Image (cartoon, rainbow, N blue to C red):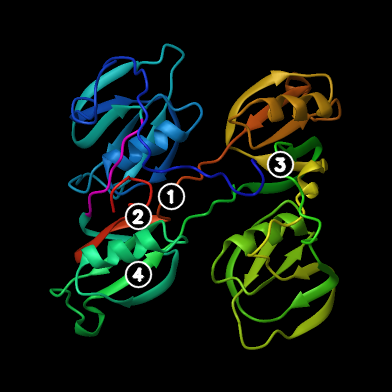
Amino acid sequence: AEGSVLNLVTCHIFLYVVFLFPMCVSGPCLPKNIDFQGTDIMFVESPDAEHCQMICTQHPTCLFFTFVRPDWTQDTRDFSCYLKSTPTGTPNVQTLLLGVTSGYSLKSCDTSQCTNTDFLGADYKTFFTADYEECQRACTYDPNCQFFTFINELFTQQNMRYKCHLKFSWPVPRLKVKRFQGVVSGFSHRIPTVDPDCRIKLLPNTHFTVSNVLIMDAASPEHCHAFCSAHLLCAAFSYSSEDFKCYLKTNWDYLPSEAKDGFTSGLPMRFCQPDSRWLQTQFEGVDFLGSDIRFELMDDPDSCQRTCTEDPHCQFYTYLTEDFDSSSRRRRCYVKSTITMPAPPEVAKLDNAVSGFSRRNCGSV
């Protein structure tokens, strides 16, 4: 990763060449009720087709997408954004399908609100505002806020009316980690200069026993430290080297601990750039699952690491050594990337709720 933070400018407008509509803007590029069948790379939750288009644009291999709209009635896949790709750059099959919108990779600046929509989770601050515009302004002027949900005056539960929920999105790439023989994994070496005043201080064989705000995978205690530093509600963390679990802790009043083998704990850093030399570590016997951009045949893990570093899209990699159990896949270098643009963890219908995004990078606020 580019340090621990990828500074994606969410709303900055770029013009990309797209395959079927080389001069198009968001209107003609987003035909309703057309499904680009198959060739899925992955799917994520998204509030609307424009946001799905932005996710597709950031993803290094996504060329087009299909978004399942809120008016979809066949099953529970509404708000699903399917990222897609083909060698030709165009869909293999286009069919008529009610309730979906499809389009191509390009950047746009979407600042509209999504009515009757809730961006679930990722809250870090709540308060009351007169209307959704004021809630959006609060989000825009708070550097930590990426998107918001506002509960309007018609909401059923009276004591929740006019409540503004500010939300954040991970700037640190998240990944799934698993112990596996015959693999070596690591991160891109495009890292910032180390600040000598901000060394990461870790407490070995220590477990903080307060409650967790979140449990996630991490490759090392330092990686867990980066997650805690990025999460606005994380007061401390404990990391288990046995199963690669990172426990982000919430209690700000006290911090009891216990001695526990295999655990490492620490505190976040939010006001300086921490030591990032840990990103140069290679993790033997550790697989970073999924998020593949492509693979190439290489002779050793160091060559794989250099390939990842030279690729501007690569954030981390996994190399399959000569000891890997499947001989046909040995010497493969998988370069990988995850989406780090602002994206709600989950999107759902909710009457009398209004959700939207910060307008911080859209020129006019």
Q: Which residues are magenta?
A: 107-113
Label 3 packing within 10 angstroms: few (<14), some (14-19), many (20+): some
User: Mark 4, mark 3: which one is toward the viewer?
Assistant: 3
Residue 358 numbered tag: 2
Q: Is residue 341 above or below residue 210?
A: above
Q: Is residue 143 magenta?
A: no
Residue located beneath label 1 in the image: 342
Q: Name the outermost residue toward the bottom.
A: 253
Q: Amino acid at mark 3?
A: Ile
Q: Are marks 1 and 2 in contact (CB under 8 Å)?
A: yes
Query: Which image quadrant for residue 321?
Result: top right
Q: Which image quadrant: the C terminus?
A: bottom left
Residue found 35% across the figure and 25% down from its top: 15
Could you say whether the residue bearing mark 4 is in a helix, strand or loop? strand
Residue at 46% across, 60% down: 143
How far, Cα to Cα, is label 3 from label 2?
27 Å
Q: CA distance from mark 4 to mark 2?
A: 12 Å
Residue 111 located within the stretch drawn in magenta: yes
Q: Residue 245 falls in which quadrant of the image? A: bottom right
Q: Tag 4: residue type? A: His
Residue 165: image tag: 4
